[in-house]
Image (cartoon, grey):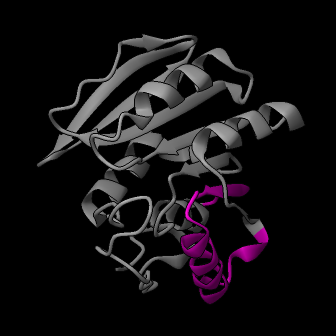
Amino acid sequence: MRLTGGSLKGKKINPKGLGKRSDHGALRATSSKVRESIFNIIGPGIKGAVFADIYAGSGTVGMEAMSRGVAKVYFVEADRKRSRELEGLLAHCGCKDRADIKAMDAGAFIKYAEKTGLKLDIVFLDPPYGSGELDAVLPMLGSGTALADSAIVIAEHARLETLPDESGTLRKHKEYRYGGTRLTLYRKE
């Protein structure tokens, strides 16, 4: 896999365990086409932002965000083995200085962000398809204090899965379809 844009464009990364199962399901990296679309959706607002790659897995989306100019990326991955592998990938890319790896589940990270006063500008959610995780995490984000005032949340999920039009302060802004994948964009209002 290669990063598709920014200062690390073309950098080859090979996440271990791609397609292999663990306690948290098979590692399914976001395709380069979908990654490119995510950053086209976000646009120039990414420069200097605080980004959270929740359910980071291979970490390619967060690394792509770093390549495109975010100030800091929180890689949230509950699988401790994957978290350790992610540390190695970040060192390989030379971007550990703007990364913070959190070996915890999504709910624990959101509570951590609220407790420490962390404000997230962009959140990318990519749980295992059909897991029901988005049903729990979107309300936590929408009703909590972890999001900055103009935050956006992008959820990657199966094309046939429908997400709510609103969740707390989050309002669905737009949906994008790519084969069997759907991206749903929320904005904080």
Give coordinates of residue 118: x percent, y percent.
81, 38
Q: Residue at x 24, y 36 (%)?
A: 176
Tell me which corner region of the image, top left, top right, bottom left or bottom right, holds residue 19. bottom left
Q: Specify whether 32 is left or right of 149.
A: left
Q: Is residue 118 left or right of residue 80?
A: right
Q: Quadrant of residue 27?
A: bottom left
Q: Nearer the viewer, residue 54 or 130?
A: 130
Residue 98 counted in the magenta span: no
Q: Which image quarter holds the C terminus?
A: top right
Residue 158, position in %: x, y?
22, 41
Q: How many marks?
A: 0
Q: Position of residue 187 (x, y in %)?
A: 51, 22
Q: Residue at x 55, y 64 (%)?
A: 79
Q: Nearer the viewer, residue 91 or 57?
A: 57
* 79 to 172, vertically: above or below: below
Q: Position of residue 11 (x, y in %)?
A: 46, 84
* Residue with the most extreme right position: 116
Task: Note whether 26 is above or below 92 in the view shown.
Answer: above
Front-lying residue, 25 or 145: 25
Residue 88 in view (yes/no): yes
Residue at the farthest front position: 23
Q: Residue lying furthest left in this view?
A: 179
Toward the viewer: 54 or 79? 79
Residue occupying image coordinates x 72% and y 65%: 99
Confirm whether residue 70 shows in the render.
no
Q: Is residue 92 left or right of residue 185?
A: right
Q: Which residue is drawn at the image coordinates 71% and 50% (left, top)?
A: 48
80 falls in the magenta region? yes
The N terminus - image quarter: bottom left
Q: Which range of residues does the magenta coloring cover?
A: 69-97
